Image (cartoon, helix red, strand yellow):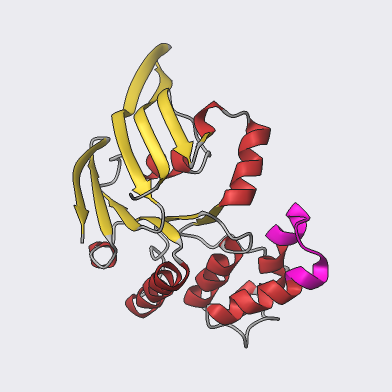
Amino acid sequence: MPEAIIRFEHVSRTLISKSNGVEVDTTILPDLSFEIERGEFTAITGPSGSGKTTMLYLMGGLDKPTTGKVFLEDLEISSMNEDELSEVRNAKLGFVYQFHFLLPEFSSLENVMMPMVARGRYSAQQARKKATELLSDVGLSDKLNSRPNQLSGGQQQRVAIARALANDPLVLLTDEPTGNLDSKNSAMVFDLFKELNEKHKQTIVVVTHDEAFASKTQRIIHILDGKVHSDTRM
């Protein structure tokens, strides 16, 4: 049977703000239950404000539900404290955002090495070797010593993907990873994700407005008003 790697059980997320001194509740996710299976390449789509980025943040332990439970494998991450969540994020999750967030003063190689060295899982020599391999995997073996401002937008995003893979994450969570890229570089990022999924069985969740990108994944979860409007396996 398929194994769930991420599971939402009756998850809601409500934000409380103040307007003219009066508290106002805004419900982003009213009651959401679904699973992501191990090895799936899933796109989450929907209009702006539909709740898809909130879903991704809940999956990654970057936000907590108001009610309900979020599981990563058999870990209920929604009940963890910040120190526990930080450990889970570093050990089990990789993140790629619309903006690459590379450190400008460091080379591609150094940017990819940082998560490995920070965790203490690898020696500096081991981290250098693995970072070199990851950058080769994303087609940047000739850009090891280049700083971000010496790279194109597509190359910067590929460095960010290599960095997200540095600690062998169970799940790669990506938020609009092609939002700042042209069609050629968007296609290159998709091909890279597809290869990671097919060759290495990497579980990938992509939040995207790009319908063409989403249509080529294995599964599309379309969110409307914080609810699953449709769930299609391709």
Camera-side residue of 83 and 104: 83
Q: Position of residue 31 (x, y in %)?
A: 29, 27
Image: 119 above or below 59:
below
Q: Residue furthest top?
A: 22
Residue at 29 percent across and 57 percent down: it is 209
Residue at 81 percent across and 68 percent down: it is 124
Image: 135 above or below 75:
below
Residue at 56 percent across and 56 percent down: it is 169
In the figure, is residue 132 to the left or right of 32? right
User: Which is the main secondary structure of the residues drawn in magenta?
Assistant: helix
In the figure, is residue 160 to the left or right of 182? right
Image: 70 above or below 35:
above
Q: Position of residue 59 (x, y in %)?
A: 45, 42
Camera-side residue of 27 and 4: 4
Total numbered badges shown on the rendered structure: 0
Q: Residue furthest front?
A: 1
Residue at 67 percent across and 78 percent down: it is 132
The span shown in magenta is 115-127
Q: Position of residue 201 (x, y in %)?
A: 44, 65
Q: Residue furthest bottom?
A: 142
Q: Position of residue 134 (x, y in %)?
A: 60, 74
For residue 12, which quarter of the picture?
top left
In the figure, is residue 196 to the left or right of 124? left
The magenta stretch spans residue 116: yes
Res. 84 visible in picture = yes
Position of the C terminus, as image quadrant, is bottom left
Res. 104 visible in picture = no
